[in-house]
């Protein structure tokens, strides 16, 4: 009985998604540590490359952490010279976040890591399977996002 239940869980999509995400986080943590960084710092750098000039609050929303957590990450990245805070032109309370030229080698490393992981993920899979998997994951994300944005139903 236990073996059959374990086998069922190993093929359960929820468990599979969780395990894949855990494995990816573990790999990213190891790779970032080789550069003396954290995965969270890498995530911040990747977002700032994509959307320069974000505020700390906007960045916190994107990475789904509290603004104080982002502030601490930015403090460390600023101290290492890869991120800078600049005053907002319209609101003096807001500081905008920008990458410095010193971030370029780290961004190259992040891109190389992403390419390696993408290649590993695709090993043994036909391009059509990758496309179908991507489409399915996008649909799952949309479904979960929609569910999260709807107000909670009250119990009767």
Image (cartoon, grey):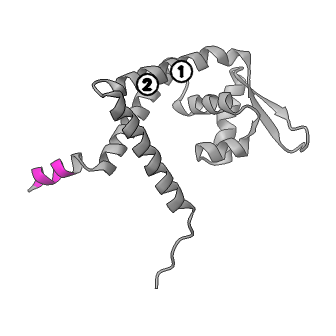
The residue singled out by tag 1 in the image is 111
The quadrant in which residue 117 appears is top left
Image mark for residue 30: 2
Q: Residue at x 83, y 31 (%)?
A: 86
User: In the orientation shown, which residue stands out farthest toward the bottom?
Assistant: 156
Relative placement, left or right, of 74 versus 152 is: right
Image location (x, y in percent) of residue 71: 69, 39
Image location (x, y in percent) of residue 38: 53, 29
User: In the orientation shown, which residue stands out farthest toward the front?
Assistant: 128
Q: Residue at x 40, y 35 (%)?
A: 131
Residue depth check, mark 1 versus mark 2: number of the one nearer the observer = 1
Between 77 and 113, the one nearer to me in the picture? 113
* Tag 1 secondary structure: helix
Magenta stretch: give its range.
Answer: 2-8
Relative placement, left or right, of 40 versus 68 is: left
User: In the orientation shown, which residue stands out farthest toward the left?
Assistant: 1
Mark earlier in primary sequence (1, 2): 2
Is residue 36 visible in the rendered structure shown here? no
The quadrant in which residue 111 appears is top right
How far separated are the C-alphas under marks 1 and 2? 15 Å
Relative placement, left or right, of 51 versus 143 is: right
Relative placement, left or right, of 139 versus 126 is: right
Q: Taken as a whole, is the magenta stretch helix, strand or loop?
A: helix
Image location (x, y in percent) of residue 92: 90, 42
Image location (x, y in percent) of residue 2: 11, 54
Image mark for residue 57: none
Between 71 and 62, the one nearer to me in the picture? 62
Q: Residue at x 43, y 24 (%)?
A: 30
Q: Residue at x 89, y 44 (%)?
A: 91
Quadrant where the N terminus lies?
bottom left
Is residue 88 shown above or below 84?
A: below
């Amino acid at each position: 009985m236990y073996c059959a239940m374990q086998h069922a869980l190993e093929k359960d999509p929820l468990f599979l998604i969780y395990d894949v995400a855990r494995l990816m986080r573990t790999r990213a943590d190891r790779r970032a540590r080789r550069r003396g960084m954290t995965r969270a710092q890498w995530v911040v750098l990747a977002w700032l490359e994509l959307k320069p000039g974000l505020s700390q609050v906007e960045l916190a929303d994107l990475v789904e952490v509290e603004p104080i957590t982002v502030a601490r990450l930015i403090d460390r990245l600023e101290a290492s010279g890869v991120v800078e805070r600049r005053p907002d032109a319209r609101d003096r309370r807001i500081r905008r976040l920008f990458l410095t030229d010193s971030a370029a080698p780290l961004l190259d490393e992040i891109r190389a890591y992403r390419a390696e992981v993408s290649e590993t993920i695709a090993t043994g899979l036909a391009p059509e399977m990758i496309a179908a998997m991507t489409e399915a994951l996008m649909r799952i994300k949309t479904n979960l996002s929609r569910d999260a944005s709807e107000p909670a139903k009250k119990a009767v």
